[in-house]
Structures are given as C-alpha cells and as structure tokens.
Amino acid sequence: MAVKPQKGVRSVEEFKTQLHRHGLKATRPRIAVHTVMMDLVHASPDQVVERFREAGVKVTVASVYNILSELSDNHIYARRLSAAGKMFFDAIPESHVHLYDRENHTYRDVVDEELSAIVEEHLGRRKFKGYSIEDIDIQFVVRPTKRKK
C-alpha cells in the first residue's frame, strides 16, 4: 500500500533519489523509517519506534536513532532540539518556520514566507565577527491556550 506524504515531505521515490545522491543505499530499514516519517513529519526516535510497535514490528530505539542521525548528517532530514532537550527529527530539511508546543512536545510547521523573507533579508546584511550564517531556523515556543467554557 502506498503512503501519501504530508505536504513538503519527500515521497518514497524522491527519498530514494536523495539517498543515492548522498551515496547511501535505499535499504529496507531506511525506507521503513522514512515511511513512518512521511506521516509524523517531526518525531523523536521513540515516537518512530512506537509507530513500528503499533504495527507489530520489533525495532530498537538505537537503530532508529542511527538511521535518523545518518539522514540528518546527510541533510536529507533536519535535527530539532526541543525546549526539554529531546532530539526530534524533521522530514523537511529545507528552512521553514516552526511552532514548538512546550506542553505537548510537538512541532508544527508554519508557512509564513513573508516572515522568512524579512528575517533572511535582514540577517543577510548583518555581519557577525568570526561567523558566517549557515542557515536560519525560526522557532516559536508556544503553550496551548486554555479555552473558557
């Protein structure tokens, strides 16, 4: 059964192409992890393992972490460190804005091209002695609002 990726996430075929561009083989474990990430988009290794276990597949957190780390090291995925110090991985490595829910420990993508353009333009003119800007990562740390009944 084919899994349809969420917006911005590479399909399995696009993922395989990325692997080959980076000299990596499209192994069954890598494809399986990516298939889970196509649905989760932002996840910790524990969350990926939980999805496998729900499907009756035995896998260790260490093996999932190693696959996610390798994908991140090759810029196929991105790393996200939560405010609680937990490592998450993002199946969309291109720069984009995030909301991080501090209470539920979840990430959500925000499409705000205007904000991204303003920040990139402003920082593009700035100089930081001894540093060059490699990437711009905008993350808003949020808390759910309590609705009054």
Image (cartoon, helix red, strand yellow):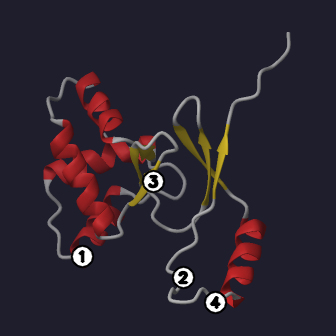
Image disc number at residue 51 = none
Image disc number at residue 127 = 4
Of the numbered discs 3 and 2, the one sitting upstream in the chain is: 3
Of the numbered discs 3 and 4, the one sitting upstream in the chain is: 3
Q: Residue at x 43, y 41 (%)?
A: 39
Of the numbered discs 1 and 3, the one sitting upstream in the chain is: 1
**Can I make out residue 2 in this image?**
no
Tell me residue 128's x, y (percent).
60, 86
- Mark 3: give few (<14), some (14-19) or many (20+) Cα within 10 Å: many
Tell me if label 1 and label 3 are in contact, CB under 8 Å. Answer: no
Decide if residue 144 is on the left or right side of residue 52: right
Tell me if label 1 and label 4 are in contact, CB under 8 Å. Answer: no
Tell me if label 2 and label 4 are in contact, CB under 8 Å. Answer: no
Label 1 and label 3: CA atoms lie apart by 21 Å
Q: Quadrant of residue 71?
A: bottom left
Of the numbered discs 1 and 2, the one sitting upstream in the chain is: 1
**Can I make out residue 20 in this image?**
yes
Image disc number at residue 22 = 1
Q: Quadrant of the N terminus?
A: top left
Of the numbered discs 2 and 4, the one sitting upstream in the chain is: 4
Amino acid at dot 1: His
Mark 2 secondary-structure assignment: loop
Closer to the observer: label 1 or label 4?
A: 4
Amino acid at dot 2: Ile
Furthest-top residue in this view = 149
The residue to which callout 3 is attached is: 80
Tell me if label 3 and label 2 are in contact, CB under 8 Å. Answer: no
Amino acid at dot 3: Arg
Q: Residue at x 19, y 52 (%)?
A: 66
The residue to which callout 2 is attached is: 133
Label 1 and label 4: CA atoms lie apart by 32 Å
Label 2 and label 4: CA atoms lie apart by 9 Å
